[in-house]
Amino acid sequence: MNPETRIILKHIEKYLATGVVPDALIPYYDQHGKWFGAPGIWFHTKRCARLDAITSSHLSESRRSYRDRSGIVLRTSYIWRGNTNIHLNYSKINGSLNVKGNGMIHAPWLREIGGSLISTTSQRVCLPNLRKVDGYFEVMRTFDLLVPRLHHVGGRAKILGLIPPSLATVGKSLGVYWCFRAESDRLKCVGDYLALTKAETVKLSDLQTIGGSFLLTVQTQVIHTPRLQSIGGDFLAESVHDLHAPVLRSVGGNLDSTSARGFYHPRINVGGTWAICPGDAEDWWRRDAARKLMKGKTIML
C-alpha cells in the first residue's frame, strides 16, 4: 500500500466516525461534489463495505472552491467525460485535472495542479500559464500541447513531440514519444528513466542526473549532454556516433558506446558491462601516456 492510499484510508475512517469530510479528502471529490477517489482506493473500498460508504458521500458547494488574489481556486478535482471543448477559469486546481474525451482544453489562468493532469484528447491542450503539476502529467494523444511555462512535474510525465521549453525537473520518469529532435536548455533532473523514442538528435545542455535508465532507439545518432554526471540505470547508445558527455562519471547499469569513437574514459564508473568502441580504450591510454610525457618534458633554452 502506497503512502497516499494509507493517508486517504485514515481520513475516510475519520469521515465515517464524524460524518464530516476532512479537508485532506477534498481533492478526491470532483467539481460537482461527488467522490472520485485516487488510484488504489477503489480496491480497498470495494473490499470493505464500511469503507465503501465514502462513494455515496457528497461535498457541499461551499467547500469546493474559493477565490483568492490569484483567482478562483478549485479545491476538488476537475473530471470531464465527453468530446466538447473545455474552458476553465481556475488559477489553481488542488486535486487532479482528468479529461477523458476528445475536446480542446483551454485554461488560460491555471498556474498549478496539486494532483495529476491526465488527458486523452487529440485536440489542442492550451495551458499557457501552467507552472507546476505535483502528480502525473500524461498527455499522450496530441502533438498540439502548449505549456510554455511548465517547469516541474512531481510524478511521471508522458508526452508527444517535444520537451516543454521550461521543464526543469521531473520527479519520476519522463517519456517523450515521436520526438525526432530532443532539445532542451532547461531540463536538469529526471528522477527515474528518461525515454526518447524516435529521437535522432539529443541535445540537453543542462541535464545533470537521470535516476533510472537512459532509453533510446537505433535512430539516435547524436547525443550532447555536456553537464550530465550520473545515470542510475542502463545507457544503451549503441548507434550513437557523436556522443558528448564529458563529465559523466557514473552509470548504474550497462553502458553501450560501440559506435562512439573517442568516448571512452576510465573515470566513468559502470555498474554493469561496458561495450566500448573497438580500439577506443587502447587509444585513450596511448594518448594519456603521450600527455604525461609532454607534461614531464623539460624545455631547454
Image (cartoon, helix red, strand yellow):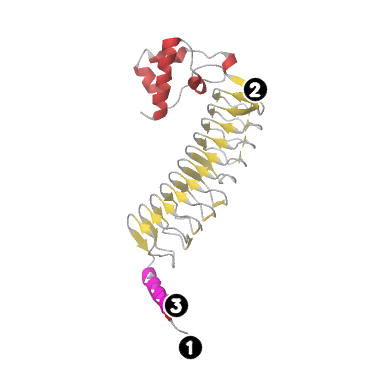
The residue depicted at 37 percent of the width and 72 percent of the height is 285
Viewer can see residue 85: no
Q: Is residue 63 left or right of residue 253?
A: right
Q: Is residue 285 magenta?
A: yes
Q: Is residue 190 left or right of residue 50?
A: right
Q: Main secondary structure of the magenta part?
A: helix
> Is the residue marked by circle 2 packed among few (<14), some (14-19), or many (20+) residues within 10 Å?
few
Q: Which residues are magenta?
A: 280-295
| Circle 1/circle 3 CB separation < 8 Å | no
The residue depicted at 37 percent of the width and 18 percent of the height is 46
Q: Secondary structure at mark 2?
A: strand
Name the front one of labels 2 and 1. Answer: 1
Under mark 1, the amino acid is Met
> Which numbered marker is on residue 282?
none
Q: Which residue is mark 1?
A: 300
Name the front one of labels 2 and 3. Answer: 3
Q: Secondary structure at mark 1?
A: loop
Q: Which residue is mark 2?
A: 67
Under mark 2, the amino acid is Arg
Q: Which residue is mark 3?
A: 295
Q: Position of residue 239 (x, y in %)?
A: 44, 59
Under mark 3, the amino acid is Lys
Q: Nearer the viewer, residue 42 or 9?
A: 9
Marks 2 and 1, Cα distance to the nearest angstrom?
80 Å
> Is the residue marked by circle 1 packed among few (<14), some (14-19), or many (20+) residues within 10 Å?
few
Q: Position of residue 240 (x, y in %)?
A: 46, 60
The residue depicted at 53 percent of the width and 20 percent of the height is 30
